[in-house]
Image (tube, helix red, strand yellow):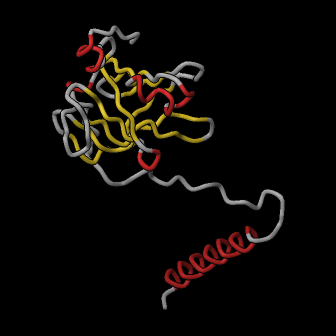
């Protein structure tokens, strides 16, 4: 073994020993012995770069009156959907602006992925899919938008200012 190889080997072994000693120190109850949290990607899957929200879905959307009781804050919900973000608001709640963490599928009338907004030290999911009806498979009527929130369920929205279909059929005016 040459002198250079011996010195390189000794340096590597010393570095490994210091790292092992640091690891052992981290397992004790010493103050400050905690390792900093590792940054983990939100989701490595999806379409890159993240595509825009389809134009057909963009705009102002209000909750369907029948669904109001299930919405966050117990009242009507409004989404303002742009090409890259979703602004969510409801009475008594703080507005939230969500962006896509990842997108798995996009068509002319739907987008699937995860849209989340800052929430304290973490993030809250605003939507995992947006699907513009008609979609008989999911029970989405023509002109309605189905917003899914993963395991939290889903709700339906209509364009701001649009009359509910039953109100149009009976001539009843809506407050939306």
Comparing 58 with 169, the one in front is 169
Q: Judge whether 135 appears above or below 54 on screen.
A: below
Q: Judge whether 168 appears above or below 145 on screen.
A: above
Pinpoint residue 128: horizontal percent, then vertical percent: 37, 42
Pinpoint residue 172: horizontal percent, then vertical percent: 32, 10
> For the point 19% across and 39% down, which residue is it?
135
Pinpoint residue 171: horizontal percent, then vertical percent: 27, 9
> For the point 37% across and 40% down, which residue is it?
148
The quadrant in which residue 61 appears is top left
Q: Is residue 27 left or right of residue 158?
A: right
Q: Judge whether 118 appears above or below 170 on screen.
A: below
The quadrant in which residue 145 appears is top left
Q: Is residue 12 left or right of residue 88?
A: right
> For the point 21% across and 32% down, which residue is it?
133
The quadrant in which residue 58 appears is top left
Comparing 149 with 166, the one in front is 166
Pinpoint residue 175: horizontal percent, then vertical percent: 41, 10
Q: Is residue 3 left or right of residue 15?
A: left
């Amino acid at each position: 073994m040459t002198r250079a190889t011996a010195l390189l080997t000794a340096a590597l072994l010393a570095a490994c020993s210091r790292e092992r000693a640091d690891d052992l120190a981290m397992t004790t109850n010493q103050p400050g012995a905690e390792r900093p949290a590792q940054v983990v990607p939100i989701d490595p899957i999806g379409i890159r770069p993240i595509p825009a929200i389809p134009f057909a879905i963009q705009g102002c959307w209000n909750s369907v009156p029948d669904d109001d009781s299930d919405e966050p804050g117990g009242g009507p919900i409004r989404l303002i959907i742009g090409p890259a973000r979703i602004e969510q608001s409801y009475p008594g709640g703080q507005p939230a602006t969500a962006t896509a963490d990842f997108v798995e599928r996009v068509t002319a009338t739907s987008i699937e992925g995860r849209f989340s907004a800052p929430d304290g030290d973490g993030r809250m999911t605003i939507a995992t899919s947006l699907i513009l009806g008609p979609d008989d498979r999911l029970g989405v009527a023509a002109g309605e938008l189905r917003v899914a929130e993963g395991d939290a369920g889903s709700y339906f929205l209509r364009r701001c200012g649009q009359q509910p279909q039953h109100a149009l059929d009976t001539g009843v005016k809506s407050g939306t």
